[in-house]
Image (cartoon, rainbow, N blue to C red):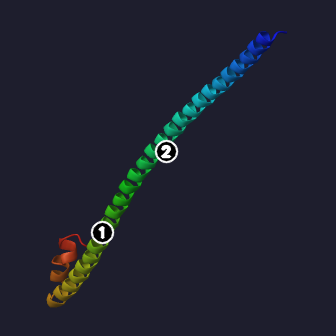
Amino acid sequence: MTKDNNNSEIELTANFQQASVYSKLRLLSDCIRDLNQESESIRSFINTVSNEITVTNDKIQNYLAGNAKRLDLLKELNNKLYTLDYKRRCYTDEYMELVPLKFIKERYDPNVLYNNK
């Protein structure tokens, strides 16, 4: 082998190695880019679902708060109803005590008149 041939062969080997390294770098760069895109896609999906869950939780919390207020109102109305029933019974008892005859009491019993027995 001559020196020129030897130099050409060394140069060819060096060029091949450079091309091989360049190809690997290119391949690795493409893989990294693909992985970054996939990561971004997954991150975006996670953020979207997380935001939807947050919105849903907020709606549920608002709904529950509204239900709690309605429940408080129902309790208040139930207490008022109990008080009204109690007052009605007291007034009915007093009314019946003031009516003198049994016949009249039966005829004018407010519980019978207003179907409130």
The spot of residue 101 in percent (x, y) is: 16, 87
Residue 12 image position (x, y, % from top left): 72, 15
Mark with earlier residue (2, 1): 2
Callout 1: few (<14), some (14-19), or many (20+) C-alpha neighbours within 10 Å? few
Q: Which is more toward the observer, 35 or 48?
A: 35
117 vs 28, left or right, is left
Q: Which residue is mark 2?
A: 46
Q: Quadrant of residue 114?
A: bottom left
Q: Secondary structure at mark 2?
A: helix
Q: Nearer the viewer, residue 110 or 19?
A: 19
The residue sitting at 17% across, 77% down in the picture is 107
The residue depicted at 18 percent of the width and 77 percent of the height is 110
The residue mark sitting in front, 2 or 1, is: 2
Q: Quadrant of the N terminus?
A: top right
Q: Quadrant of residue 58?
A: bottom left
Please, what secondary structure does the residue beneath circle 1 have?
Answer: helix
- Residue 70 falls left or right of residue 38: left
Q: Between residues 34 and 28, which one lies in front from this camera angle?
A: 28
Query: Residue 70: x and y, percent?
Result: 30, 65
Residue 74 is marked as: 1
Quadrant where the C terminus is found in the figure = bottom left
